[in-house]
Image (tube, grey):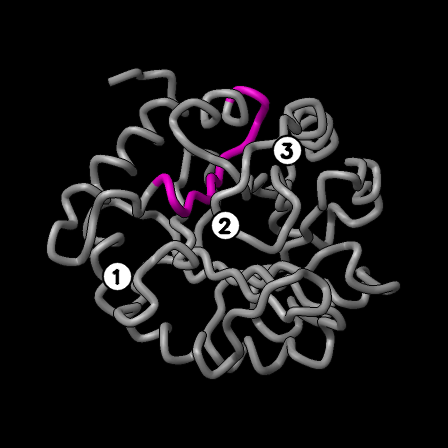
Amino acid sequence: MSFDRSIKIAPSILSADFANFGQEIQAIESQGADWVHIDVMDGHFVPNLTFGPMAVKAFRPHVKTVMDVHLMIAPVDPYIDAYADAGADVLTAHIEAGPHIHRTLQAIRAAGMKAGVALNPGTPAEAVAQLLDLTDLICVMTVNPGFGGQKFIDMTSKIRSLRSMIGDRPVHIEIDGGVDPSTAPLVAEAGADVLVAGSAVFKGGSVNDPDVYGANIRNIRDAANGVWA
């Protein structure tokens, strides 16, 4: 994974056809997805239950770009090696999920993955001030985690604070929740470069009609880059 600050679209497969994940992943990548975002939920840290390590390992052969695994689970540390074995390129843990996030980020990197830290809407940017040199990605939640399709919560001031704190460090700012062509420009202008989008990518398309995915991805990217279709 090389680092750059260009806009990257990371469709969340939480909005894909659950009976057809392999083809869905291939479809979004063929239509311009930069990363593939996988939301892991435990029914404990968040009120939903999704993918375990075995499911993520099954997705891996289909992902040719970056497999971006977002853990919305607590505890995190006992599962780091399992998601490394499953093939995650980026593994993100919530700062709210445990008392020792510094140790968690060290362990993620030691397992050979890029380390991400996620912030819920109520958690301030300053919470990661002492973690920036251990972090490859900061995920700003613009919804309360747990379900797809929620309404965007404006976190642009937090994004600007993070962008200033990061300086010239090679740290991505990722936005997760409510991203579509109307919200993408707000977060991109504030300093975000990885945009997670679920329903805004998958709506209206299918593996039999993947061009719709491509149009949706382009619309989000163009909006983020200031080009309105």
Residue 168 is marked as: 3
* Circle 1 Cα neighbour tier, 10 Å, few/some/many (<14 / 14–19 / ≥20): many
Q: Please state the horizontal and vertical placement of residue 147, each as a whole percent of the image.
A: 55, 53
Q: Earlier in the sequence, mark 2 or mark 3?
A: 2
Select label 2 or label 3 by which is in front: 2
Q: Please name the residue that numbered disc 1 is placed on.
A: 24
* Circle 3 Cα neighbour tier, 10 Å, few/some/many (<14 / 14–19 / ≥20): few
Residue occupying image coordinates x 12% and y 50%: 209
Residue occupying image coordinates x 62% and y 31%: 153
Would you say 186 lies left or right of 132 here? left
The part of the image, by quadrant, that contains residue 47 is bottom right
Q: Earlier in the sequence, mark 1 or mark 2?
A: 1
Label 1 is placed on what type of residue? Glu
Residue occupying image coordinates x 29% and y 43%: 203
Would you say 158 lies left or right of 53 here? right
**Magenta segment range?**
189-200
Residue 140 is marked as: none
Label 2 is placed on what type of residue? Gly
Considering the numbered disc 3 on the image, is that residue within a helix, a strand or a loop? loop
Check contact, mark 3 vs mark 1: CB within 8 A. no
Considering the numbered disc 1 on the image, is that residue within a helix, a strand or a loop? helix
Task: Say above or below: 123 vs 163.
Answer: below
Select label 1 or label 2 by which is in front: 2
